[in-house]
């Protein structure tokens, strides 16, 4: 069936993989990518599909209610996949208010617009909210987050995402808005902004700069290849039960220090450096304030209900990721210099 799907944050890391998947796999859908193009949004992530007849891009801010209302009125979307967010924990510690605006107010702005245009015919419509495992808080040495784990967010970022999750559920209960949610673990892969651990370390290793490991590097994250997250979103979008939440994870836990050491080994191989060269760059730095110790996901619900499993083995995905950053030097250079941001600002200011 034909659908018009709004994807928010489609110029970002995960959003660009979701846009690509939907544009190429569903040529009969119209995919509209709405993105503010903050420092984290980059249209260069989508050059391969930007001319597809079923794709269009709109630059705009999800916090701007009159703009969002008129976009929904004009486009009459059948579904929304909402990924736009401020996503970096360290930035939320420095500037929490921006996270409240985008992640909470922006989500309610979209919910309001969807509620108004769908109120008379909610059948077949869907508001899909993409969230994070960080809403569940921090684990000790054992255990995993389930969909029923009580929320316990501990950073301004995770608190803003938790708040947005609650509001999505509140719109479902109060206004019967058809919604679905997913909470995913750490993603890795091409097109991630190099402020996050892995692309930052790849960039620094290449340039012989220190690799900042927070605290003792003992914190644990569960890593999933970004395309597997996009595939899970596709399954939940098409076959997930309305009103439900699905946890998504890689079942692939790594202590930060061990992960960075593994990355150093792969980088040495790719760069033809002697084994052990890059590891010498590891530098322990002051810990992140309130640093969550461990995240781990129980993804049995999505596995049992929808048959989703990660398809990419970690060694393969990790190697592919390093290869991508090394062979896309221009992308890395432009996002680290900020030149692309200046270009967009100038280009869109002229319009
Ligand atoms: P990202 O920071 O790479 O991309 C976010 C995108 O949203 C950017 O393109 C940015 O320009 C856009 N954006 C920001 N504010 C906006 C606004 N006010 N209006 C319109 N667009 C705006 O983020 P990501 O890592 O791709 O994460 C995408 C989503 O997935 C987020 O909701 C995040 O919470 C969630 N998530 C991320 C991960 C992860 O490991 N990266 C894991 C689980 C869930
Ligand atoms: O769990 C899902 C979350 O994963 C997403 O919701 C977030 O949007 C995403 O940014 C990510 O959050 P993290 O804080 O886990 O990712 P980050 O890459 O910032 O850090 C990963 C781990 O590495 C974390 O324990 C902090 C540590 N770290 C990070 C950086 C940037 C370092 O030790 N050094 C660093 O320089």
Image: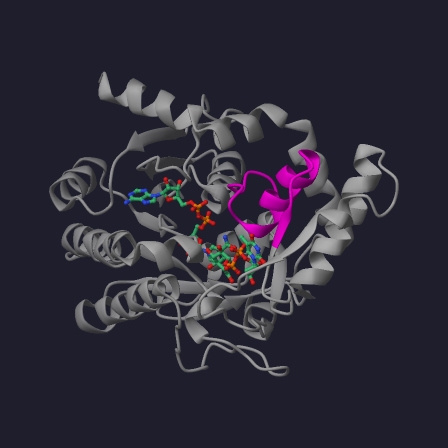
Start-end of magenta stretch: 189-212
**Viewport quadrant of the C terminus:** top left
Q: Residue at x 16, y 50 (%)?
A: 117
Q: Residue at x 23, y 71 (%)?
A: 170
Quarter-of-image position of residue 275: top right
Q: Residue 123: percent from the left, percent from the top?
A: 27, 58
Q: Nearer the viewer, residue 85 or 50?
A: 85
User: In this rendering, is residue 197 above or below 202?
Assistant: below
Is residue 36 covered in magenta?
no
Extreme residue toward the right, this view: 274
**Viewport quadrant of the N terminus:** top left
Q: Nearer the viewer, residue 94 or 225?
A: 94
Is 248 situated left or right of 205 in this image?
Answer: left
Q: Residue 5: percent from the left, percent from the top?
A: 35, 43
Q: Residue at x 29, y 19 (%)?
A: 346
Residue 316 makes an appearance in the image: no
Q: Residue 124: percent from the left, percent from the top?
A: 32, 55
Is residue 198 covered in magenta?
yes
Extreme residue toward the left, this view: 66
Residue 274 makes an appearance in the image: yes
């Amino acid at each position: 069936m034909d659908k018009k799907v709004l994807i928010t944050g489609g110029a970002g890391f995960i959003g660009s993989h979701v846009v690509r998947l939907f544009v190429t796999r569903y040529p009969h859908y119209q995919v509209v990518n709405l993105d503010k193009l903050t420092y984290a949004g980059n249209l260069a992530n989508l050059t391969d599909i930007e001319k597809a007849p079923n794709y269009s891009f709109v630059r705009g801010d999800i916090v701007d209610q009159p703009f969002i209302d008129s976009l929904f009125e004009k486009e009459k979307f059948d579904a929304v996949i909402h990924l736009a967010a401020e996503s970096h924990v360290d930035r939320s510690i420095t500037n929490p208010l921006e996270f409240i605006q985008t992640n909470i107010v922006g989500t309610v702005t979209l919910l309001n617009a969807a509620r108004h245009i769908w109120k008379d015919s909610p059948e077949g419509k869907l508001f899909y909210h993409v969230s994070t495992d960080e809403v569940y808080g921090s684990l000790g040495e054992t255990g995993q987050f389930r969909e029923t784990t009580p929320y316990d967010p501990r950073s301004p970022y995770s608190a803003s995402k938790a708040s947005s999750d609650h509001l999505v559920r509140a719109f479902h209960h109060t206004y019967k808005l058809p919604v679905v949610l997913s909470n995913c673990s750490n993603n890795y892969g091409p097109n991630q902004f190099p402020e996050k651990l892995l692309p930052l370390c790849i960039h620094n290793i290449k340039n012989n700069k220190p690799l900042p490991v927070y605290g003792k590097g003992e914190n644990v994250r569960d890593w999933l290849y970004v395309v597997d997250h996009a595939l899970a979103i596709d399954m939940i979008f098409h076959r997930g039960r309305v009103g439900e939440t699905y946890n998504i994870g890689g079942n692939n836990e790594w202590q930060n220090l061990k992960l960075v050491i593994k990355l150093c080994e792969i980088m040495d191989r790719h760069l033809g450096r002697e084994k052990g060269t890059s590891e010498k760059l590891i530098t322990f730095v002051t810990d992140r304030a309130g640093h969550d110790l461990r995240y781990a996901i129980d993804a049995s619900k999505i596995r049992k209900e929808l048959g989703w499993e990660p398809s990419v083995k970690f060694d393969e995905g990790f190697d592919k990721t390093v290869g991508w950053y090394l062979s896309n030097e221009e992308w890395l250079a432009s996002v680290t210099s900020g030149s692309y941001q200046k270009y967009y600002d100038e280009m869109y200011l002229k319009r």
